[in-house]
Amino acid sequence: MANQARIESLQDNINRPTRSIQYPTKADGKPVYTSEIFGENVFHLQQIAKALPKPAYASFLKQMRGRQALDKSTADAIAHAVRIWAMDRGATHFTHWFQPQTGTTAEKHDAFLSLKSSFSANGEEVTAIDAFSGSQLLQAEPDASSFPSGGMRTTFEARGYTVWDTTSPMFIQEGPHGTSVLYIPSVFISYNGDALDEKTVLLRSTSAIAKSACELLNLIDPVPVGAQPRTSHVYTTLGTEQEYFLVDRSLYSLRPDLKHTGRTLIGNLPPKHQQMDDHYFGRIPSKVLATMSEAELELFRLGVPVKTRHNEVAPQQFELAPIFEEASLAVDHNLLTMDVLSKVAHKNKLKVLYHEKPFKGVNGSGKHCNWSMSTDRGENLLDPTVKPETNYRFLLVLVAVLHAVQNHGGLLRTSIASSSNEHRLGACEAPPMIVSVFLGEHLTEVLDSIEESRPIKNFSVPEMQSIKLGGTVLDVKVASLPNIARDLTDRNRTSPFAFTGNKFEFRAVGSKQSPAFPVTILNAAVASALDDVTDALRKQMGDRPYPSDADKIAVIKKFIASTKAVRFEGDGYSDAWIQEAEKRGLPNIKTSPEAFEQLLNPIHSEMLTKLGIFSSSELQSRHLILQERYSKDLLVEATTLSTILTSQILPAVFEYRGSLAQTVQLLNTIEGEGNSPELSALQALTPVVKELQAAVAALDEVVHKMHTVGDDPVEEAKFACANILPALNEARAVADKLEVLTADKFYPIPRYSELLWF
């Protein structure tokens, strides 16, 4: 029966035509340009400007920038305008869209429909109207006790609030039966004002880094007394490279492990997987390309600037990457991208797998976060320019980032820790668990030369002179091809935090997680480091009104020297680096429960509370939520694997053994042969079956013990890491041996060779 379902799913996969949609066209039948539909489902500032009187619009802009509160009349005007705009596009409902600490988004739909009562001599008359007030726009009230809160909310203290985030534009998404829904990006807080979500702390961190960066920039670039500072705001930018797998949905439905845990808990690699290096940047399969194109069309309409699509290294692994944006908006857009891609894949009879390691033995998936800072004049603070050795603003910001990673590398490790990312980190496909910084040969030479007070080496000719990070010319020595520009910094894919020309790439972030928490921690660490650099500069300049170049160089030298330990240009996958990192005093945090403890380390917790990004209670809450989620993830995996092995794999193998035994008995009767190949197969199978039964029993015993640990999430996470994880691995190893020995017609679930193929 199970095998027949596999066969039918495979046949459907082969015979099913590729889904086709109508791409938008102009009146003359020509396709519309992407720029013409970009953001058409977004309620932009332009629409708000049209709906509000100029004074009210100016007031709203001040509120967006945190300079004043939003008054009721302005909120009512915006609410009326967005309701008309949304209903004209088919919206029947609205929702506050927020990011609880579940790793995904949440929403509750409310209709615009309302009832209006009027009273007369004839009694009450009820009239249906469409309405949406400013108070409904600004605030809603979900049950906070039903979301992870780390003990901050309980059933008898359940009130929580979602509040409109005015910095992220509202948008509409497709609903059922040709309708749509108005989405209002929001933060989620408790009755007492504590952050219960990912976005609140992210917005706090962007404010903190803006304040710290502006203070440094205005110190080194002073203006006359009484004049406006040159830099009034700094914002962080983010571009997220989203990796994912796509598998056939009918085959997916036959794998309980994929459905319940997001990854395969058993399974062997097919003979051909990624070892030929032919999937990366290969031709995109037609079904996948159709899915990508449809998802991109919807994302363009939602104002998400998706830019790149391609095959990744592993079979059935792909990537989608956007143009960088302001960080909090980029986080919203990444979560929206994951949601849209999942919906469109479903329509195409496919399933998106965002788990960091859905298939053992092939590369896992990450979410590379390309991070930088920009001023309100559009200047990238991490742009080295042509002569970085004299660009003191760049160098001061650069050493601040190095100082941040040096001081808070353990906290950055916390930000990417999860039960799923553990399977990817430290393998030869993803950055190690030691957080270090790669700058590249040329920037390293810039810093070394400044520290040693010597001229800078030139990498094109043997003499010494200033280097230019603009690149050199590379002659490919083919007459028909032009010379090309070569970057002067190579890429180090083994580094968790690498400088890539004018930004840092935080490569260790997992594909399934929201980028909000890693970016929050990175922003906080850099904000604190910028404060340290500013303090050092003030101390160096003494009573002078502004720092001289010599003051700047002295401070830069100081931080170059103090951050050398965190800079590493070599192979992060090597055992030698682990030993070297230990000598340098860099933390090598191997497990997630250990990483979560970094949140309560005074070095990190005091920094986070001092900047106002977390309160002490919020840190305690998040620490417990992370520990609890980790243990629950492993518990779900253990019970799922036990169920699969007990109810599917072992019964199927018993049936196969019975078939072999009947064949052996029949052959003995007919041929009198006591040493047939069938008997050898049966004899090879039997001890492995017994071994698997023992492994299942051991797994069940560990699960039982897990329930007796108590109600302490920290102890439960430690127990799960030390006991459930090894038991899972042991049971898998035996089950995978059994898969090889079991005839295909008896095997009950789709194999890797079927899942990793179109």
Image: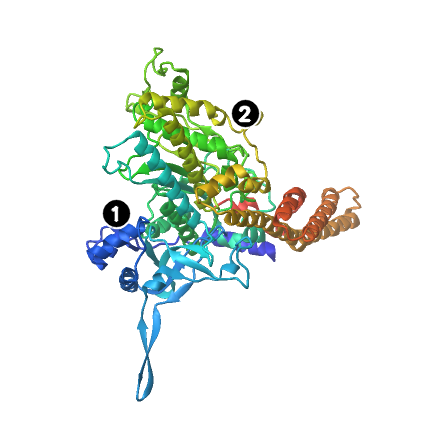
Q: Residue 94, located in which quarter of the rendered image?
A: bottom left
User: On the picture, is 520 further left or further right than 750?
Assistant: left
The tag earlier along the polypeptide, 1 or 2, is 1
Looking at the image, which is closer to me, 156 or 659?
156
**Furthest residue in direction top, as rendered:** 463
Q: Position of residue 163 (x, y in %)?
A: 39, 57
The count of marks equals 2
Percent of width and height locating residue 639? 64, 53
Q: Quadrant of the N terminus?
A: bottom right
- In front: mark 1 or mark 2? 2
Q: Which residue is mark 2?
A: 584
Q: Which residue: 62% across, 52% down?
A: 640
User: How crowded is the residue under tag 1: few (<14 C-alpha within 10 Å), some, or many (20+)?
Assistant: few
Residue 498 placement: quadrant: top left
Colour theme = rainbow
- Residue lying furthest bottom: 122
Residue receiving disc 1:
35
Above or below: residue 452 compared with residue 24: above
Q: Is residue 476 visible?
A: no
Decide: is 654 above or below 676: below
User: Which element carries disc 1, helix, strand or loop?
Assistant: helix
Residue 123, position in %: x, y?
33, 87
Looking at this view, is 579 or 19 the one in front? 579
Dot 1 amino acid type:
Ser
216 sits to left or right of 663: left
**Residue at point 39% right, 37% down?**
371
Rate crowding at label 2 as few (under 14), some (14 to 19) or many (20 or more) other CA atoms within 10 Å: few
